[in-house]
Structure formats: structure tokens, C-alpha cells
Amino acid sequence: MSGIRIENWEIITLPWEKKHSLHGQVYGHPRVPDGNSVTTSILRDLREDTAVTNSGTVYLLGKRKEQPFNTDAATATKEFQCLSM
């Protein structure tokens, strides 16, 4: 599957909006050089293998940033769903 891939990603909270985004290194982005760090626009949806932002960009999820606990995408999806309630 080709597209924009985000590696070494983590969910971040934008305190001024109480919304969530991803921060990580992107590959295959039309405007950002491979390996550069980005913070996405606000997340609309997060699945085990993809994230969709409010701007409509679809990111393929690579490896999540090392965390002391809960490092897989399935857990991140559950975290996002809980944070969004």
C-alpha cells in the first residue's frame, strides 16, 4: 500500500483546542521531505493501520514511538476513542 506513511508517531493533545493530532516522521508526503518531523492536523479517525485528519489526509501508521506501555496501534486506537469522548 502506498501513500503518506508516519513513523515513530505518538498521539499528542493540542491543549488550546482539546483535540488530538499525531506527531512523527513522514515519508511519501507531497510537500514534506522524507524523514522530517510533522504534527498532523486534528485527527478525525484512528484505526490500527491508518489515521485520517480533519483536512482529509490519510496516514499509514508505521511503528509507534517507543512508550513504556501500550505501544501497539490497536491500543492507540482505543486511547484515541477514549480521549475523544
Image (tube, rainbow, N blue to C red):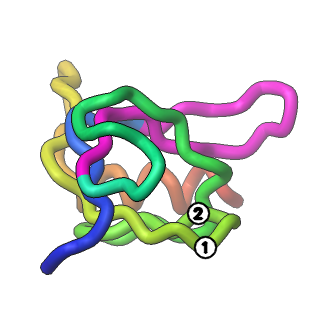
Residue 79, label in figure: none
Above or below 52: residue 11: above
Task: Please state which amino acid type lies under the numbered disc 1.
Answer: Gly
Span colored in magenta:
11-27
Q: Which residue is drawn at 19% across and 19% down?
A: 68
Separation of disc 2 and disc 1 at Cα? 5 Å
Q: Is mark 1 on a helix, strand or loop?
A: loop
Q: Residue at x 33, y 29 (%)?
A: 36
Q: Is residue 31 left or right of residue 55?
A: left
Residue 24 in percent (x, y) is at 35, 34
Residue 58 sits inside the magenta stretch: no
Dividing the picture into quadrants, the one containing residue 55 is bottom right
Q: Is mark 2 on a helix, strand or loop?
A: strand
Above or below 24: residue 76: below
Q: In this view, does 72 lie to the left or right of 77?
A: left
Residue 13 sits inside the magenta stretch: yes
Number of numbered markers: 2
Q: Residue at x 14, y 44 (%)?
A: 63
| Identity of the residue furthest to the bottom in this view | 1
Residue 25 in percent (x, y) is at 30, 34
**The N terminus lies in quadrant:** bottom left
The residue where tag 2 is placed is 53
**The C terminus lies in quadrant:** bottom right
Mark yes or no: residue 48 visible.
yes
Mark yes or no: residue 70 visible.
no
Residue 51 in percent (x, y) is at 42, 65
Residue 39 in percent (x, y) is at 53, 35
The residue where tag 1 is placed is 56
Neighbor class of circle 1 (other Cα within 10 Å; few <14, some 14-19, many 20+) is few
Q: Is the magenta stretch mostly helix, strand or loop?
A: strand
Instruction: Determine contact: label 2, label 1, CB under 8 Å.
Output: yes
